[in-house]
Image (cartoon, rainbow, N blue to C red):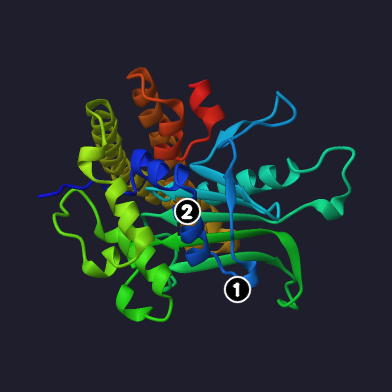
């Protein structure tokens, strides 16, 4: 009986979508909000996932998959296991860097091509019941007025339920691939295998396709994710306790001016965020002392690469 690895892991995700052009094309066409068939991607070339700044003193960053199509449009794909408040800023930073990197002094601005940032999040971060979130730069009063160039898609995988989305076949199949296949899978749905692209992606995550060294890396990744989740839960609990204490103290002081309720709320929020950040720094120090790759530490904790390097 065949065994499979979870395609959401760093090793497997990059193997499936970072090494097979046909799979990443199908994936992007299914999940990006292209309005017309002629907008769909026909071919891609992989780009260096390391976004190196033109100024060596500026911040460097690495993404999971980065490619460009025949029209010059760039696509950044990231798999994020845990949500942190800083993740949206990191996404904006990476997409903006990819956008401005197209232009040198000799090229006019009109040659700039759009950058699409597709972010799969194995966590929830919004109160919306929808799993699909499409961000663009629009006018506040006239939302049909759009500044083209950057587009951000965030998908909350835990909210995905295939029964509700029968009209977008390939989108449903790709999201089922990410959410249904894991280490416990022994039989893959015939619906998934009926698609040539999905079937190929399933073969790519068969356990037998990986070396012993790769399997050790895979297991280590999940160990770190599990440990980090526990640490973040503890950090949130500690942050909540500190926040409640600070909120009460701040609320007592600010209550005379702005009201007890507002002061407590602000103090609790600040305390919780402070506690979370302190715990992330503590976790990162432990990981770094154990020789874990800095980029893996950055992805798991939500800290920037510079913050991790400075520890």
Q: Distance between the residues labelled 1 and 2?
A: 17 Å
Residue 66 or 69: which is nearer the viewer? 69
Q: Residues within 10 Å of mark 2 (few under 14, many from 20)?
A: some
Q: Does any portion of residue 234 appear in the rendered image?
A: yes
The residue sitting at the left extreme is 1
Residue 290 or 29: which is nearer the viewer? 29
Answer with the quarter of the image where residue 117 lies: bottom right
Say which element carries label 1.
helix
Residue indicated by mark 1: 37
Q: Residue 287: x, y in percent?
A: 35, 26
Say which element carries label 2.
helix
The residue that appears at 28% across and 50% down in the rendered structure is 203
Answer with the quarter of the image where residue 115 lies: bottom right
The residue that appears at 45% across and 46% down in the rendered structure is 20
The residue that appears at 55% across and 37% down in the rendered structure is 49
User: In this rendering, is residue 268 above or below 142?
Assistant: above
- Contact flag, marks 1 and 2 (Cβ < 8 Å): no
Q: Residue 185: x, y in percent?
A: 17, 54
Residue 71 or 96: which is nearer the viewer? 71
Q: Mark 1 or mark 2: which comes first in sequence?
A: 2
Q: Does any portion of residue 252 appear in the rendered image?
A: no
User: In this rendering, is residue 26 above or below 145?
Assistant: above
Q: Residue 202: x, y in percent?
A: 29, 53
Residue 115 or 29: which is nearer the viewer? 29
Residue 175's disc is none
Residue indicated by mark 2: 22
User: In this rendering, is residue 300 above or below 118?
Assistant: above
């Amino acid at each position: 009986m065949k065994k499979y690895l979870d395609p959401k892991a760093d090793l497997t995700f990059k193997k499936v979508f970072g090494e097979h052009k046909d799979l990443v094309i199908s994936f992007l066409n299914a999940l990006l909000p292209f309005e017309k068939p002629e907008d769909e991607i026909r071919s891609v070339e992989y780009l260096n996932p390391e976004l190196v700044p033109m100024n060596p003193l500026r911040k460097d960053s690495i993404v999971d998959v980065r490619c460009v199509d025949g029209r010059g449009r760039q696509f950044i794909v990231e798999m994020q296991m845990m949500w942190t408040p800083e993740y949206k800023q990191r996404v904006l930073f990476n997409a903006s860097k990819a956008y401005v990197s197209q232009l040198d002094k000799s090229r006019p601005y009109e040659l700039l091509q759009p950058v699409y940032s597709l972010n799969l999040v194995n966590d929830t971060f919004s109160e919306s019941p929808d799993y699909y979130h499409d961000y663009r730069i629009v006018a506040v009063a006239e939302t049909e007025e759009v500044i083209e160039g950057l587009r951000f898609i965030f998908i909350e995988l835990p909210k995905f339920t295939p029964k509700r989305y029968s009209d977008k076949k390939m989108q449903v199949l790709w999201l089922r691939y990410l959410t249904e296949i894991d280490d416990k899978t022994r039989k893959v749905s015939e619906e998934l295998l009926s698609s040539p692209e999905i079937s190929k992606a399933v073969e790519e995550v068969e356990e037998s396709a990986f070396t012993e060294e790769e399997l050790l890396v895979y297991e280590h990744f999940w160990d770190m994710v599990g440990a980090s989740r526990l640490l973040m839960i503890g950090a949130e609990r500690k942050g909540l306790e500190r926040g409640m204490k600070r909120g009460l103290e701040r609320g007592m002081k600010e209550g005379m001016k702005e009201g007890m309720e507002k002061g407590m709320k602000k103090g609790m929020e600040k305390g919780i965020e402070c506690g979370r950040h302190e715990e992330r720094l503590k976790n990162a120090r432990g990981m770094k002392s154990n020789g874990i790759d800095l980029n893996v530490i950055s992805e798991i904790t939500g800290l920037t690469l510079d913050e991790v390097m400075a520890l």
